[in-house]
Amino acid sequence: MPAHSSVPQATLVTGARSGQPPDCIGCREPIEVKDDYWTCWSGLAIERHVLAAAHGSRRDPSKDDDDDSCALALRQYWQSLLEAHGAALFRLDHDAGGPRFCAGSIPLHAGSPLEILDAKGGWLAGRFEYLTSRWTAHLWVPIGGWGEPQAALVLVDDTVVRIPDR
């Protein structure tokens, strides 16, 4: 796969904007550019191609609560695009054996190779490890230096990952 792929990413748009987003993927209504909204896009950050958009969290006065259904619809769309690119979201899940880190629905094992998507659309390869004392996960990445030094990156929920050679 090329160093920089077209794996879709999702971003909350706030503040200054340029252009009108497409209608909301969740409710099919127009999005006010003065409001915060989500976009799903591909391409380089400087040349984004918006694939879909959704309203951010909106107040539902009838329920006295926030309505996130539009953002959730975009998230489902985004996850289906990730799967089509062989990628998934990293998360801590639970199964019959207790907590378990997963790439989408695939359980991860300590020492397994794993790649994470960087902000520029490239993949950073390393080795997956975790600590059960606080359920924290790391990607150990080889770096240059004397011997074979490695740096540990903390992995958080919703990091875009893929399992190489799968």
Image (cartoon, rainbow, N blue to C red):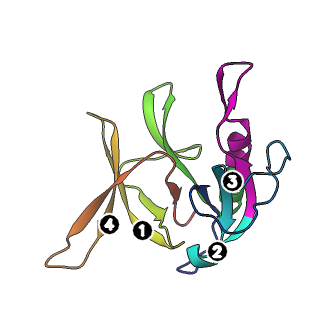
Sequence-first disc among 2 and 4:
2
* Magenta stretch, residue numbers: 51-78
Q: Which residue is mark 1?
A: 125
The disc labelled 2 sits on which kind of residue? Gly
Mark 3, Cα crowd under 10 Å, few <14 / some 14-19 / many 20+, is many
Sequence-first disc among 1 and 4:
1
* Residue 114 place in picture, x, y as percent: 45, 60
The one nearer the camera, 29 or 81, is 29
The disc labelled 1 sits on which kind of residue? Ala
Mark 4, Cα crowd under 10 Å, few <14 / some 14-19 / many 20+, is some
Mark 1, Cα crowd under 10 Å, few <14 / some 14-19 / many 20+, is some
The disc labelled 4 sits on which kind of residue? Val
Residues at badges 1 and 4 in contact (C-beta under 8 Å)?
yes
Mark 2 → mark 3, Cα distance in angstroms: 14 Å
* Residue 13 place in picture, x, y as percent: 60, 56
The N terminus: image quadrant: bottom right
